């Protein structure tokens, strides 16, 4: 990909973007995304087969399947090639937008990029692998694939397993599809690795490989360029942006699962009237906690200090790197003890003491149903006792400051936890 970064080019791009904007309500709406489809230039999209169907190619149908090798003799992966000719400057952000050809039942797939400049070579098959100029071919589902891409000749593809050769490809990330996405629905894959991979290109073409990674009973199909230009796999990118408006401030921030060294925070999704919300940053007592941009609306905080007050805020980031104002804080105090799991997984009791002088006992599993809880002082004398249910039990104590031992006992199953009351 050409990397022309002259002031003139930047001026032309910026002026073009400014003239593409319009005003909606009180916000400036900026449309900076550029679409690059597989039906443009030397672009291509094809289904490559492995296992029992490794000699077959699906390059002329309007769909491409990606699935495990437990179905019909082999796994299928999708190859997508995009022509980068004409892109100047480094990409600010990129994402892959695909259109479904089947209703999803839940699938996870990984995205790989064929290493730049790969010219092919031999694998475990009889034919040499093709390079980045692999042909899409015109064969359909049942036709022989002599002379075109197939499981044996697909670059970086191991025909017997349907996996990729990690020495020939670069991992770019993974994505899980929810159940029930209908035919015609679109979904997007984006990652910093994808943008870095495109920016590192030197020959104006990239090949992306979609490989199914689970569960083994699921699969998905995407529409190809044969389904029409509007349905062709779409690589979207921004080189430079005139967007200066930040996303909305995240709302309804709350905390849960507060323990001595960890907690979970969640919030409502932000909106962005321009090029879209890219993710979020979480701030702990004013300092950014996450290293990578958070793509979901919840986040697990770790490495916290026991019995400490925390104020958490969240800010939204758009694809032009505009960051919103930080949200209203959610505040909590970490507990003084951690999870007790010296029994089997289904026999865990969570015992801790909070700042309201309450002892919390949260039992999981039938083993502690109607268990007895007793609190002993450091002389071994019972200071307080009660019956608890298998769900959370809050015990308000009137104990003096000191060291105590909380014992949960049911039918010989017993957990003891030391508690220090301040």
Image: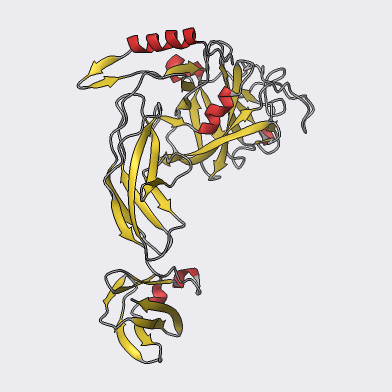
Name the side, left or right, on which 23 lies relative to 105.
Answer: left
Q: Position of residue 110 (x, y in %)?
A: 56, 37
Res 296 quadrant in image: top left
Residue placed most toward the observer, 308 or 39 = 308
Q: Position of residue 256 (x, y in %)?
A: 33, 57
Query: If the image is split into quadrants, where does the C terminus sit?
Result: bottom left
Q: Is residue 234 above or below residue 158?
A: above
Q: Is residue 102 above or below residue 199?
A: below
Q: Position of residue 130 (x, y in %)?
A: 71, 21
Q: Position of residue 32 (x, y in %)?
A: 39, 18
Which residue is pictured at 29% across the width and 40% down the height? 250
Residue 180 appears in the rendering: no
Q: Is residue 2 above or below residue 370?
A: above
Residue placed most toward the observer, 422 or 114 = 422
Query: If the image is split into quadrants, where does the N terminus sit?
Result: top right
Which residue is pictured at 27% across the width and 14% down the height? 22
């Amino acid at each position: 990909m050409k990397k022309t970064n002259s002031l003139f080019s930047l001026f032309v791009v910026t002026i073009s973007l400014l003239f593409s904007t319009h005003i909606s309500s009180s916000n400036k709406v900026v449309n900076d995304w550029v679409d690059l489809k597989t039906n443009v230039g030397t672009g291509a999209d094809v289904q490559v087969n492995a296992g029992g169907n490794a000699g077959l190619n699906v390059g002329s149908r309007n769909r491409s399947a990606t699935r495990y090798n437990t179905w019909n003799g082999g796994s299928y992966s999708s190859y997508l090639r995009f022509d980068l000719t004409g892109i100047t400057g480094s990409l600010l952000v990129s994402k892959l937008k695909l259109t479904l050809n089947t209703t999803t039942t839940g699938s996870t797939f990984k995205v790989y990029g064929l290493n730049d400049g790969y010219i092919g070579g031999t694998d475990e098959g009889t034919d040499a692998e093709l390079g980045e100029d692999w042909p899409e071919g015109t064969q359909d589902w049942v036709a022989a694939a002599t002379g075109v891409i197939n499981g044996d000749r697909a670059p970086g593809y191991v025909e017997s397993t349907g996996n990729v050769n990690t020495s020939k490809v670069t991992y770019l990330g993974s994505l899980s599809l929810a159940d029930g996405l209908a035919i015609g629905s679109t979904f997007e894959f984006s990652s910093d690795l994808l943008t870095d991979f495109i920016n590192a290109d030197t020959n104006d073409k990239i090949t992306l490989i979609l490989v199914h990674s689970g569960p083994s009973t699921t699969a998905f199909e995407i529409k190809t360029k044969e389904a029409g230009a509007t349905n062709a796999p779409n690589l979207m990118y921004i080189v430079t942006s005139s967007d200066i408006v930040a996303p909305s401030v995240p709302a309804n921030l709350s905390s849960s699962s507060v323990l001595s060294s960890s907690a979970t925070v969640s919030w409502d999704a932000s909106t962005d009237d321009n090029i879209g919300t890219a993710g979020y940053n979480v701030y702990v007592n004013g300092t950014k906690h996450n290293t990578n941009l958070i793509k979901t609306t919840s986040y697990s905080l770790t490495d916290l200090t026991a019995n400490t007050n925390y104020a958490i805020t969240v800010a939204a980031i758009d694809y032009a790197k505009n960051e919103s104002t930080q949200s209203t804080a959610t505040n909590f105090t970490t507990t003084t003890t951690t999870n007790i799991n010296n029994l089997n997984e289904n026999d865990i009791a969570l015992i801790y003491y909070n700042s309201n002088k309450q002892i919390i006992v949260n039992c999981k599993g039938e083993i502690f149903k109607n268990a007895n809880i007793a609190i002993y002082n450091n002389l071994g004398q019972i200071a307080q006792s009660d019956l608890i249910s298998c769900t959370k039990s809050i015990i308000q104590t009137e104990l003096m400051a000191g060291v105590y031992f909380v014992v949960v006992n049911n039918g010989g199953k017993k957990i003891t936890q030391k508690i220090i009351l301040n």
